[in-house]
Image (tube, grey):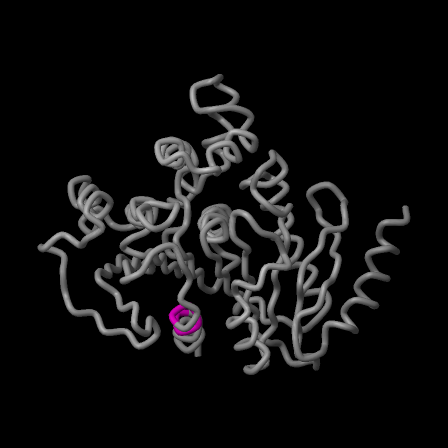
Amino acid sequence: MMLPILRIVCVLVLSFVTFGESATEIRFLSAADQSMQPAMFYHPGGEVEVPMVVALHSWSSDYKQTLHSDIEAWCVENGWAYLHPDFRGRNLRPEASGSELVVQDILSSVEYAKSTGSIDSSSIYLVGTSGGGYACLLMVGRHPNLWAGVSAWVPIFDLKAWYFETKERKLRYTDEIVASCGGAPGDSPEVDTEYWKRSPIAYLENAKGANLHINTGIRDGHDGSVPVSHSLLAFNAIADRKDRLSKRQIRHFVRKADVPKSLRSEIPDPGYGDKQPLFRRTSGSVTVTVFDGAHELISGAAIAQIENWQERKK
């Protein structure tokens, strides 16, 4: 009986302190398990509805990560709301790593923001990098109509594939994937189900029609931890058949860290700075860009993608 009262108190107190010049820590009630969960939240104040960017932290971090600070600063400068939820922190236990708790926490954080400040429900954008890019793909597959646009950077598409890739390279993520899913692929049908239902591969086809831009560095998987195949296969999952990349083309991207000759073209894009796009393809409302970089976010490009979606709404 105390939970509704507690929620009202938290909203009244915490919403007051977030109307400053940067995001501050808040607690919101998660519909997943009725627990209070942390996030960083900024709202410019006032009664006019404003757009909001929801930023999702990377695989090994939490809501206090500053990876998306340039995007936060841009939101503050432009009078947008900014939300950075925890969604159960680092991805090394069953409660995190694409769980139902994760999905509901992100949804509940958005509901908190809408109940606390004036948010334009038609202008809620999602951005994330690495594990956050993974969560972006998961959320646009699970709830495609919530987001006005999703900018996913160097994401994981298939946890099962990533398990074998990290194991081959002896990366620490292998043990964290096992801890999250309850075992290695093939250990049991139950474990295999966990890998499937926690992966965007199970849901991304639902995102047809959603504004989605997937970004990956050409050297990721060599200098970084997530091979470019994850981004290219995520694109294929939504793209029209005629626009999909072939298995041979994807193998070339992955093994050579290079764009196949038949796909090379000049794609100047100021948002990417000195890490210019090497390959880009659009099919319907989904775009994939392979840029001259590794496992990283290019904030200027992510902001430009969000600005473009917002401009097209006018």
Give the overall secondary structure of the magenta segment: helix
Residue pictured at 66% horizontal, 53% vertical:
108
| Quarter of the view holding residue 54 | bottom right
Query: Can I make out residue 143 in this image?
Result: no
Q: Position of residue 189 (x, y in %)?
A: 48, 18
| Quarter of the view holding residue 101 | top right
Residue numbers of the magenta segment: 301-305
> Which of 298/75 is in front?
298
Report the quarter where the C terminus lies. bottom left
Q: Position of residue 220 (x, y in %)?
A: 33, 51
Q: Residue furthest left?
A: 262
Q: Residue furthest right?
A: 1
Tell me: 247 left or right of 269: left
Query: Can I make out residue 203 in this image?
Result: yes
Tell me: 146 left or right of 245: right
Q: Position of residue 87 (x, y in %)?
A: 62, 49
Q: Is residue 158 magenta?
A: no
| Quarter of the view holding residue 75 | bottom right
User: In the rendered image of this protein, does residue 186 appear above or below residue 37?
Assistant: above
User: In the rendered image of this protein, does residue 48 appear above or below residue 277?
Assistant: below
